[in-house]
Amino acid sequence: MAANIGLFAVIAILCILLYRNRAWRYRRISRNRELDLVEEIAPRSFSFEELKIATENFKKVLGKGAFGTVFKGILGCSGRAVAIKRLENGVGEGEREFRAEMRAMGRTHHKNLVRLIGFCCDGSYRLLVYEYMSNGSLADLIFNGDGFPEWSERVRITLDIAKGLHYLHEECESTIIHCDIKPQNILMDENLTAKISDFGLAKLLMPSQTRTFTEIRGTRGYLAPEWHKNSPISAKADVYSFGVVLLEVVCCRKNLKLEGEVDEILLLEWVDGCFARGETKKLVGDEVDMEELNRFVRVGLWCTQTEPAFRPSMKKAVMMLEGIIDVSLPPPLQSSY
């Protein structure tokens, strides 16, 4: 009897130990999964020293902008390649850009937006850590002169940008106006998926707002006319910039082309003229689906109308590009200024 009781006690103790071991392992796995999930959906805080090590003392430059320099880095904790933007000044413009990007990117998650992985706010240092985009920018792809993307790729890239903007304008908690849509701010991943980047000039609207007054911001050649008229700015300013980029992708040509030091050839005027004469085939150098080409050109011309009210929303632009709704004949473009 005593032997049976002893055996039962040993078995009970073993069961308890086994249960505790499994429970500990489960909690550890759960914690790891939770950490992975937090890293996946929420920006992480890094120290300056961590990012200095990740970039090998800021060794490999990927690009430079108005407010800072972007470096390639490898995160020691995961071995993941990242792009690290180091803002030049922790005060003034650099601080404003840091705060603007954090406000905008901290509340977004979409496959056509470059993901903010983390940040550094360490003393006077301000850095932002993004997913690494291995194929450079859209500008590299369409303006390099070494061969252009196939028409099907141009169509897909254009839709990627349009869907990213639709998300910013209509699917976020607050409307986000990017304010600087241009090929240099569209980055390409390993699958040539286009993702919108650089939210340093972004403007967030309050839920009750549809437009706002703000200082001029953006890049020459992509600025909507209302920026120059002291008019309120709405998401339609991004729609205009998107229209310019759309036509640049279609034609693989820059909107502004300087001839000498004085003359300036505007892509929009050339496209509008070709469209009016029924010569849209001149816009592309290869064989394309003419119905699709004409649809894309029409959408581009609607998006770049001088009056914001005439431009479609990005939701409607996506539907027109996809052929879900018809695209009516756009009126001739007027002088923007």
Image (cartoon, grey):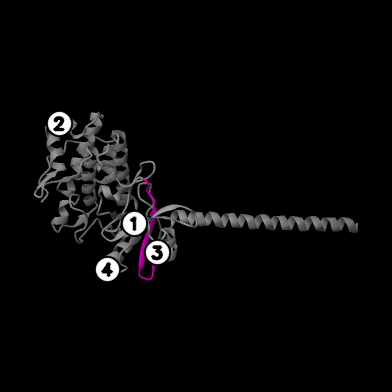
Nearer the N terminus, badge 2 or badge 1?
1
| Label number found at residue 70 | 1
| Label number found at residue 120 | 3
- Front: mark 1 or 4: 1
Nearer the N terminus, badge 3 or badge 2?
3
Find residue 207 and report its horizontal and vertical position in percent.
30, 58
Residue located beneath label 2 in the image: 279
Find residue 194 and report its horizontal and vertical position in percent.
33, 44
Q: Secondary structure at mark 4?
A: loop
- Front: mark 3 or 2: 3
Q: Secondary structure at mark 3?
A: strand
**Residue type, mark 4 in image:** Gly
Q: Secondary structure at mark 2?
A: loop
| Label number found at residue 200 | none
Q: Nearer the viewer, residue 262 or 187?
A: 262
Residue located beneath label 4 in the image: 92
Range drawn in magenta:
121-134
Q: Nearer the viewer, residue 198 or 265?
A: 265
Quarter containing the N terminus: bottom right
The part of the image, by quadrant, that contains residue 101 is bottom left
